[in-house]
Amino acid sequence: MSDVSYYTVEGLKKLKDELNHLKDVERPLASNAIAEARDKGDLSENAEYDAAKEAQGMLEMKISKLEEIVANARIIDESQLDNSKVLVLSKVQIKNLANNMMMDYTLVAESEADLKSRKISVNSPIGKGLLGKKVGQIAKINVPNGTLEFEIVSIKR
């Protein structure tokens, strides 16, 4: 996989905290669950043991995936970003040309996306459609129910 992903300092810290929680808290709990189930007798007919082993396997896959993401993560230096076009971490104000509604979004890495906080992923259809656009340009974005047109009103950091 080895895809480089870009994160804010806050976003990378959140990922590392989750990884540490999985390793330091969840992993020992999974091991204890297996040990308890093993103590209950014949492993060939022990559904609790099988379930605990499967849960441990899923946990280890999640830890492995997070370790890979953290290893390939890069911090974005916000001071080096160009305000003339929409990039990761741009705070962009757009106008929906169909209804003249104004919306403000911050484009972030996929793992930091949170619609309630008005943070959309650069990998989402709208995020992809806005990337690289400049103030005054129209972004035509294909979504499942048609094409939306947004005018880029402003770009900030």
Image: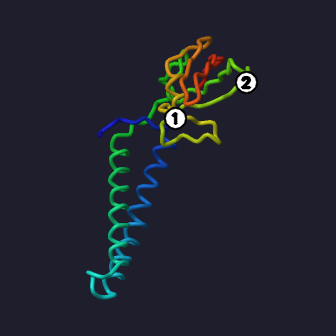
Q: Where 25 sits versus 87, above or below? A: below
Q: Identify the residue position indicated by label 2 in the image.
A: 101
Q: In which quarter of the image is residue 73?
A: top left
Query: Which x, y percent locates residue 151?
Result: 63, 16
Residue neighbourhood size for the residue with mark 1, other residues' Cα within 10 Å, grouped as few (<14), some (14–19), many (≥20): many
Q: Is mark 1 on a helix, strand or loop?
A: strand
- Report whether 29 appears left or right of 78: left
Query: Which x, y percent locates residue 35?
Result: 33, 80
- Residue at 63% x, 36% y is 118
Residue type beneath disc 1: Ser
Residue contact between numbered discs 2 and 1, judged by CB atoms under 8 Å:
no
Residue type beneath disc 2: Met
- For the residue pair 10 and 87, the one nearer the viewer reads as 87
**Mark 2–mark 1 distance (CA, rounded to whole Å):** 20 Å
Quadrant that contains the C terminus: top right
Q: Quadrant of residue 4?
A: top left
Q: Identify the residue position indicated by label 1 in the image.
A: 121
Residue neighbourhood size for the residue with mark 2, other residues' Cα within 10 Å, grouped as few (<14), some (14–19), many (≥20): few
- Residue at 51% x, 19% y is 82
Query: Which x, y percent locates residue 18?
Result: 46, 55
